[in-house]
């Protein structure tokens, strides 16, 4: 089957989507339910409809663009990703997995293919944790990993609830209606940039994901005693920032000692108050991100970290509040789908290898209700979540070609 991928059209759509950003080019900042997110969603709806796809939006804003199959008895095939972008990000993370499938569908339409099973391109809401502190909120709710009550209790740093923001974005509805049953999709495949250096370093076109590392996230709050930087002598201090510093170093030590080779841990947020040079910090707030493809290794790191922060608080006479934000199992991708994706890559004339995903993705939660795999394309030096994130239109076209052939097999 010869497929015509219009790489120039796709590249122009990716560039256009990148203009819906709170920050200036070449960075992209697009927080969920922001003005920029609404503009981007409108643009995508128009592109989906131009391709003859019917659109459904659920109560949290997950958007389903369907290419209707001839047999409505058949379970649909899903593909998709996210378009929200953390502050000062790039323009490919997530976006390739939403616009790429659109180009795959248009190429299949152009080849004369008619799907028997419907194909859904899914735009998941709030994959990034930036606004609500929890990643993959839309796919978690779809898969039943987060209940409506749990979602209702989430707040943004500036105090907005999910209802506040989704209603303001014109996305009403009962959150209880978002959940889909296991088996709702016959398969789910996500196209995404690798967010790692392996494919580029080994000059390989396509990565097929076998496992997706599981994220855990914790909030740590130390409260000590503030005071004048000149007046409070060292023996009398209860400096919360030093508790935070010890906790961050302890986290690094535990992941190096207890994590698997895929184990990573990051103290991504470290705020101290009052934050004045001549004032002893009375409060430290940390948010830590711990991941591993080996669930038990990650749980060991979490356990050791909890023990360490408790010991630090006791020794430094600090008040401690430790909150678990999330702690999820890794995803094992479906071996049949992995094999089919490799074959599709070969049929596209691409070199291919299997990979682990150390970033998490909506596929991690779609794996709770359907067989999944992911198709990775190289990105420059593995850079991501930064403005110089880059994949060439040729690299993207190879990913789209592979995805199109896989969708054709799955929906035939
Ligand atoms: O953090 C992640 O792994 C994803 O990019 N949100
Ligand atoms: Mn991301
Ligand atoms: Mn992503």
Image (cartoon, helix red, strand yellow):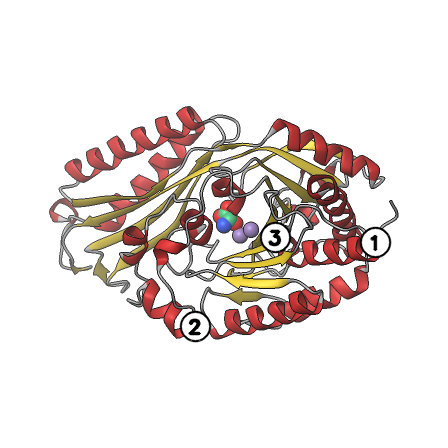
Q: Say which quarter of the image contains residue 329.
A: top left
Residue at mark 2 to residue at mark 1: CA–CA distance: 37 Å
Give residue 242's position: percent from left, percent from top. 26, 46
Quadrant for the N terminus in the image? top right
Give residue 119's position: percent from left, percent from top. 65, 50
Residue at 82% x, 55% y is 5
Q: Residues within 10 Å of mark 2 (few under 14, many from 20)?
A: some
Q: Say which quarter of the image contains residue 304.
A: top left
SS at mark 2? loop
| Closer to the eye: label 3 or 1 | 1
159 up-or-down from 319: above or below? below
- Return the mark for residue 112: 1
Give residue 86's position: percent from left, percent from top. 49, 59
Give residue 219's position: percent from left, percent from top. 29, 47
- Determine which residue is flagged by label 2: 169
Kindly indicate whether the residue at mark 1 contacts the one at mark 2 (C-beta within 8 angstroms): no
**Of the pair 73 and 301, the residue shown nearer to us:** 73
- Determine which residue is flagged by label 3: 120
235 up-or-down from 63: above or below? above
| Lower sequence index among marks 3 and 1 | 1
């Amino acid at each position: 089957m010869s497929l015509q991928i219009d790489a120039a059209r796709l590249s122009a759509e990716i560039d256009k989507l990148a203009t819906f950003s709170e920050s200036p080019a070449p960075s992209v900042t697009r927080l969920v339910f922001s003005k920029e997110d609404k503009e981007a969603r409108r643009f995508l709806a128009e592109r989906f409809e131009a391709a003859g796809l019917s659109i459904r939006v659920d109560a949290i804003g997950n958007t389903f663009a369907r290419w209707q199959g001839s047999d409505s008895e058949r379970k649909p095939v899903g593909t998709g990703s996210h378009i929200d972008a953390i502050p000062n990000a790039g323009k490919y993370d997530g976006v390739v997995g939403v616009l790429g499938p659109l180009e795959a569908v248009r190429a299949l339409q152009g080849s004369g293919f008619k799907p028997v099973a419907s194909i859904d391109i899914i735009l998941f809401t709030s994959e990034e944790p930036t606004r609500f502190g929890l990643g993959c909120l839309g796919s978690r709710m779809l898969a039943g990993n987060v209940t409506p009550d749990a979602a209702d209790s989430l707040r943004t740093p500036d105090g907005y609830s999910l209802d506040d923001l989704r209603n303001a974005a014109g996305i009403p509805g009962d959150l209880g209606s978002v959940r889909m049953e296991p088996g709702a999709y016959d398969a789910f495949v996500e196209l995404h940039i690798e967010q790692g250096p392996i494919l580029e370093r080994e000059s390989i076109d396509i990565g097929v994901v076998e496992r997706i590392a599981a994220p855990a996230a914790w909030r740590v709050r130390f409260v000590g005693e503030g005071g004048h930087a000149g007046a409070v002598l060292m023996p009398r201090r209860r400096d919360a920032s030093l508790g935070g510093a010890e906790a961050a170093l302890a986290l690094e030590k535990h992941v190096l000692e207890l994590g698997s080779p895929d184990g990573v841990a990051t103290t991504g947020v470290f705020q101290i108050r009052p934050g004045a040079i001549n004032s002893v910090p009375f409060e430290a707030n940390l948010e830590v991100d711990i991941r591993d493809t080996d669930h038990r290794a990650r749980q060991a790191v979490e356990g050791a970290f909890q023990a360490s922060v408790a010991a630090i608080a006791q020794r430094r006479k600090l008040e401690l509040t430790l909150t678990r934000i999330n702690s999820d199992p890794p995803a094992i991708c479906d071996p049949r789908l992995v094999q089919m994706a490799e074959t599709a890559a070969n049929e596209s004339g691409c070199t291919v290898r299997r990979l682990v995903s150390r970033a998490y993705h909506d596929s991690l939660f779609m794996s709770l209700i359907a067989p999944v795999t992911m198709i990775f394309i190289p990105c420059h030096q593995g850079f991501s979540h930064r403005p110089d994130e880059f994949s060439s239109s040729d690299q993207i076209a190879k990913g789209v070609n592979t995805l199109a052939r896989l969708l054709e097999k799955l929906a035939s």
